[in-house]
Amino acid sequence: MIEVEQLTAEHIERMPGLMTAAQGLGVHKIESMEGRPGVAVVSGDDVIACGGVTILWPGVGELWAAFDAGHPQAAAAHVALVRAYRKGRDDLGLWRCQATIDAHNDVALLYASRACWGMHSEGLMRMYGPAGEDCVRMAWTRPRGAH
């Protein structure tokens, strides 16, 4: 059974690949992720996905996510995370949500696209990632004040 929980340090420590996502946000100590707005998608003892938003300024947030893509319930975890993001963006009154995605991660780009997350590409950012990889800026917007 899939459950969505408030993100904690324990989830972070148990999530494969989360440190890479954290470094992409300029977070270099895993402990500093705790307390940021975020959720963990869990099934029993397994942490399948973690995600959250970093508020850049009022109305604008940077989304981040890390998945255990090999987990048998990864697709269900993705659906749960999308629901949590949508609720979060509405609760926070965001009019813009953006994400920075590795340009070579076709699966992540597909998930962020209009088909899944409703985001559109704003273009390629060369040598932007923490290891110098090219990234794509994806964004979802709505008119200010519209909820």
Image (spheres, rainbow, N blue to C red):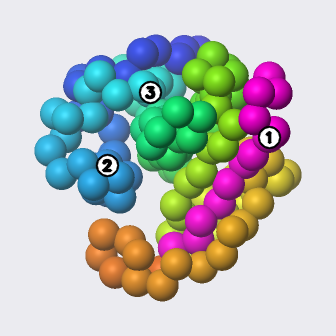
Q: Secondary structure at mark 2?
A: helix
Q: Residue at x 18, y 51 (%)?
A: 28
Q: Secondary structure at mark 3?
A: strand
Q: Nearer the viewer, residue 48 or 90?
A: 90
Q: Secondary structure at mark 1?
A: loop
Residue 22: which disc? 2
Where the N terminus falls, by quadrant?
top right
Q: Residue at x 15, y 44 (%)?
A: 29
**Residue 141 is covered by the magenta coloring:** yes
Q: Nearer the viewer, residue 59 or 73?
A: 59
Q: Amino acid under label 2?
A: Ala
| Mark 1 vs 2: CB contact within 8 A | no
Q: Amino acid under label 1?
A: Arg
Q: Say if residue 136 shows up in the picture.
A: yes
| Mark 2 residue crowding within 10 angstroms, few (<14) / some (14–19) / many (20+) | many
Percent position of residue 114, x then y: 82, 53
In which image quadrant can residue 74 be found? top right
Dot in front, 1 or 2: 1
Mark 3 or 2, nearer chain start: 2
Q: Residue at x 53, y 40 (%)?
A: 61
**Residue 91 is covered by the magenta coloring:** no
Mark 1 or 2, nearer chain start: 2
In which image quadrant can residue 33 be found? top left
The magenta-colored residue range is 135-147
Q: Which residue is mark 3?
A: 38
Relative to 121, residue 98 above or below: above
Residue 142: which disc? 1
Mark 1 or 3, nearer chain start: 3
